[in-house]
Image: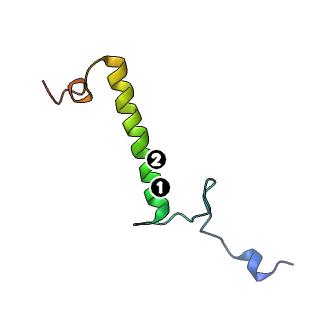
Amino acid sequence: MTSSSETENDTSTPSATTTDVPAFGWSGYAERVNGRFAMLGFAAVLLIEALSGETFLHWAGLVP
């Protein structure tokens, strides 16, 4: 027989890399994830500039 605490659904499963529970809005978890994606984007821009020899704006066709 199972107790009532074992049958409850736990919908707030923590992340594998932190004990914070993912939440919508301005939370520490959301800001951390946003910062990580920003770092990946910045690294991608640096990689594009290093491999192409042009600035990112010129490579993307935004500046003639």
Where disc 2 sits, the SS reads helix
Q: Position of residue 43 (x, y in %)?
A: 41, 34
Q: Residue at x 60, y 58 (%)?
A: 18
Towards the viewer: 24 or 52: 52
Quarter occupied by the N terminus:
bottom right
Q: Residues within 10 Å of mark 1 (few under 14, many from 20)?
A: few
Q: Answer left or right for 38 relative to 9.
A: left
Q: In the image, is residue 30 above or below residue 44?
A: below
- The three-letter amino acid code for the residue at tag 2 is Arg
**Picture disc at residue 58:** none
Q: Position of residue 29 (x, y in %)?
A: 50, 61
- The answer to which quarter of the image holds residue 13 is bottom right
Q: In the image, is residue 13 above or below residue 8?
A: above
- The answer to which quarter of the image holds residue 14 is bottom right
**Picture disc at residue 32:** 1
Where disc 1 sits, the SS reads helix
Q: Answer left or right for 11 relative to 39.
A: right
**Picture disc at residue 36:** 2
- The three-letter amino acid code for the residue at tag 1 is Arg
Q: Residue at x 34, y 31 (%)?
A: 45
Q: Residue furthest bottom?
A: 4
Q: Position of residue 17 (x, y in %)?
A: 61, 53
Q: Are marks 1 and 2 in contact (CB under 8 Å)?
A: yes
Towards the viewer: 59 or 10: 59
Q: Residue furthest left?
A: 64
In three-dimensional space, the C-alpha distance between marks 1 and 2, rounded to whole angstroms, equals: 6 Å
Quarter occupied by the C terminus:
top left
Q: Residue furthest right?
A: 1
